[in-house]
Amino acid sequence: MPDIVALGELLIDFVHKDDNEYGYPVMHANPGGAPGNFLCAAAACGASTAFIGKVGDDAFGHLLVDTMKKYGIDTSGIAVDPAYFTTLAFVTLDASGDRNFSFARKPGADMMLTTENLRYSLLRNTKVFHFGTLSMTDEPSRSTTREAVRIARESGAMITFDPNYRAPLWKDESDAAEQMLWGVKHADVVKISEEEVKLLLNESPEEGARRLVEKFGVKLVLATMGKKGVFFANKNASGLVFAFNNLQTIDTTGAGDIFGGSAVYKLLSMGKKPEELNCEELTELCRFANAMAGISTTRSGGLPSVPRRAEAEDFLRSMVD
C-alpha cells in the first residue's frame, strides 16, 4: 500500500537563468509539475509514493519517467502517449525570485489522461490521494481526475487538494474558481495560497481558511502566504506560523508543492486525523513544512531543489539552539 498517490501534470520547467545579449532569457531545463514536486518532497521525507499521469513518447517524457524512478516514486501509473507532446512550462523570475509562467500545452500529454489510463490498484490501496486543478482545466483529464477522486474516497483514502492556480491555463477566472470549488468540496486537507483564497472567496487567508473549515467542511486548511508564513485552521485551532526569512532565496519554483508534500508526510507520521490535531501539533507540522520549502528556495529549480528530511530537521534544531 503506497502512503501517497498523486495525479496530475508532469512537465519540464524551463527556468530563467540569465539573459543573452539580445535580452532574451537563457533557460535551464528541470523536471517539474506540481504533483511531481509534491511527491518528491514526500518521498524525500520517507513516504512511499506513486504517480498517475501522462507524458509524451518523446525525449522529455522518458526523462521525466526516469527522474520519478530516481526519486523512488512508483511510475507504473504514468502512461506514455505517442500522440501528444510532453507539456513544457517556461518560468521567468523577477529580481526577488518570484515567478511568471508560460506554457506549451495545446494540448499537452497531461491534458489527455483518460479513465482507461487510470491504475485502479493504486487508487484503491493508497492512504492519501492528492490532486490539483491543472488536471481539471480541460477534458478528458477533468473527468478522469473526478473519477480518480471518487474511487480513492470510496476506498477510504484521505483526499488532499492544492488548487495550484496558473492563470494562463484557464479560459477565465470563473472557470478556475468553479473547479477549485469542486476540489475544496471533495477534499479533507486543502493547501491553498493567498492568491487562491482571494480568487475563490475574496477574503484574507485567515478568514478564508476558517470559512473553508466552518462552511465547506474541510478538515484541515493550510493557507500559505510566502514570506509571511502559513495560516492553519481546523475545528480545534487556528494560527499563523512564520516563514524562515533568514534564508537566502534565489528561486521559489515548487516551494508551495514542497510545503504541501512535506506537510502531508508530517500529518501521516503523526498518526492522527487532520481534524484531531491540536494547536501545538499543527504548529510543529507547519514549521517542518516551512523548513522544507524554505531550504528549497535557496536552490534552483523545483524538483531538484527538494531537501532531505534530515536537512529540515537539522535546520529546525539549529533554530532552537
Image (cartoon, helix red, strand yellow):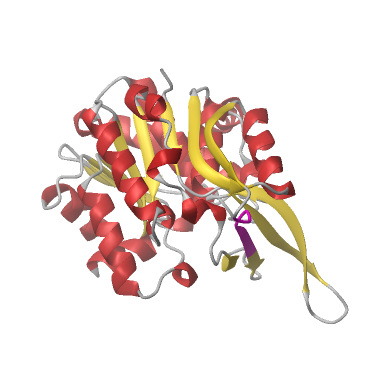
Instruction: State whether residue 239 is above or below residue 118.
Output: below
Q: What's the residue at 68%, 34% (across, down)?
A: 66
User: In the image as oriented, which residue stretches furthest toward the right?
Assistant: 21
Residue farthest to the bottom, as pictured: 22
Residue 131 sits in which quadrant?
top left
Q: Quadrant of residue 80?
A: top right
Specify whether 303 is left or right of 129. right
Work out which quarter of the rendered image holds the C terminus and state it: top right
Q: Tell me where residue 247 appears, x and y as whole percent.
A: 61, 49
Which residue lies at the image location 15% right of the left edge and 51% below the top edge?
Answer: 216
In the image, is 202 to the left or to the right of 129? left
Work out whether 134 lies above or below 80: below
Give the image location of residue 177, x and y in percent: 29, 66
> Does residue 100 show up?
yes
Task: Tell me which residue sits at (60%, 57%) in the image.
Answer: 87
Q: Which residues are magenta?
A: 84-90
Nearest the viewer among 230 and 28 is 28
Q: Quick one: quadrant of the N terminus? A: top left
Q: Where does the image place residue 209, in percent across and percent down from the top left? A: 24, 53
Question: How many numbered callouts?
Answer: 0
The answer to whether residue 117 is magenta is no
The location of residue 143, given as percent across then percent down, is 32, 51
The correct choice, above or below, for 68 with respect to 301 in the image is: above
Task: Give the residue displayed 14% in from the left and 45% down from the top.
Answer: 217
The outermost residue toward the left is: 215
> Who is closer to the viewer here, 303 or 122?
122
The answer to which quarter of the image holds residue 174 is bottom left
Q: Is residue 241 visible?
A: no
Seen in the image, is 321 located left or right of residue 127? right
Is residue 86 magenta-colored?
Answer: yes
Q: Is residue 215 left or right of residue 26?
A: left
